Structure formats: C-alpha cells, structure tokens
Image (cartoon, rainbow, N blue to C red):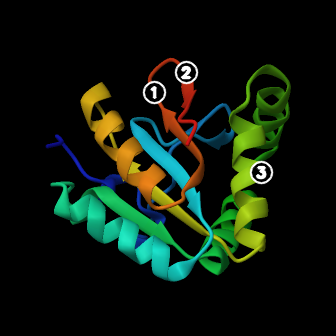
Amino acid sequence: MTEHTHAEHDPTLSTEANPIDPPTQSGVLYPKDDIVAVIADHAEAEKTVQALMDAGFPSGDIDLFEGKQVLELERDFQERKTLAGRMATFISFIMSDAGTYQQEYVDEAAKGHHILVVHAPEHDVVERARAILAAHHAHSARHYGSLAIEDLIL
C-alpha cells in the first residue's frame, strides 16, 4: 500500500545508537502523508487499530500512542531544540496552524487521550481511513499533506 512505513520516523523505535527524530517543518511536528487523530478511550483506540488492519492498512503504517507516551515524546522533542529551532517554532505558530495543532494533541494527551497516526500518502487511503476513524469516535483528525493540513471533520 505504501512505499515506506512509520519506522523511518517513529520515535518509539529510537535508540541511543540509532536516534530517530520525528518529522518536522519550521520547528514543529509535521508528519507528512500521515493522519493524526485523537481517540479518548483506550479500548476504542485498540478497536480502531484493528479495524484499520482489517481494512488492509499494514500494521507498520499505524502508530497508537498513549497520552503519557505523547507527553514524554513532546518533552524530549522540546529539550533537543536549538535556539534556531525555537525561533522557527515561534514563527510557525504565527504563520501556520501546525504549531497550534501540535499543542492541541499535547493537550489531549495530557487528558489521558490516545493519539493515532496512520500513514496515508494518497487521497483514496485518506478517505478509507476517514470512514474508519469516524466509526470509532476519533476527533481532531487531520491529514498532513505536502502543501497543507486537511481537517478531516468527523
């Protein structure tokens, strides 16, 4: 289905010997060709992952993060930022929505909600995932495309 998986930028696979940095653009997280969504309930999040796999999404193209994991990853991400990175983040908050969305996902994680990331490089894949996410009560779902972030109103 895809030419690569999340393994190229999955921070949970990062090791000291092989660090993996999350994908960024202008100092904020920007998981290009991915859908990011919030699912409040753990059992529902697990059902969503299973439904995606049942629909043909490879398990390597699906990442489910518990709120605590997201907060740890965000802390690590912020601690590694250089001064130039902090300036880029400031500008990004002014010039685009990406920084605001990142903060929204962190706020959802602080509530104990789960963050689901699904690799969706093509429009038909986005639409297939959108239907599954809607059926499983996901919210704040967005597709990070090459040129824009599309709100997948569910």
Mark 3 lies on residue: 103
Residue 126 in view here? yes
Q: For the residues marked 1 and 2, what is the alpha-carbon distance in whole angstroms? A: 5 Å
Give the quarter of the image for residue 110.
Answer: bottom right
Q: Badge 2: few (under 14), some or many (20 or more) residues near its Cα, within 10 Å?
A: few
In the visual, does 140 lie left or right of 122?
A: right
Determine the residue positioned at 26% across, 52% down: 5
Q: Badge 1: few (under 14), some or many (20 or more) residues near its Cα, within 10 Å?
A: some
The residue closer to the viewer here, 141 or 104, is 141
Q: How far across and down, in percent of the image, does residue 72 sit?
A: 67, 75
Residue 81 in view here? no
| Quadrant placement of the C terminus | top right
Depicted 153 relative to depicted 61: above or below: above
Give the quarter of the image for residue 47.
Answer: bottom left
Q: Look at the numbered discs 1 and 2 and tell me whether their residues touch, using CB distance below 8 Å.
A: yes
The tag earlier along the polypeptide, 2 or 3, is 3
Three-letter code, disc 2:
Ala
| Quadrant placement of the N terminus | top left
In the visual, does 124 lie left or right of 76?
A: left
> Quick one: SS at disc 3?
helix
Determine the residue positioned at 70% across, 48% down: 102
> Quick one: SS at disc 2?
loop
The residue closer to the viewer here, 56 or 16, is 56
Three-letter code, disc 1:
Gly
The tag earlier along the polypeptide, 3 or 1, is 3
Mark 1 lies on residue: 145
Q: For the residues marked 3 and 1, what is the alpha-carbon distance in whole angstroms? A: 19 Å
Mark 2 lies on residue: 148
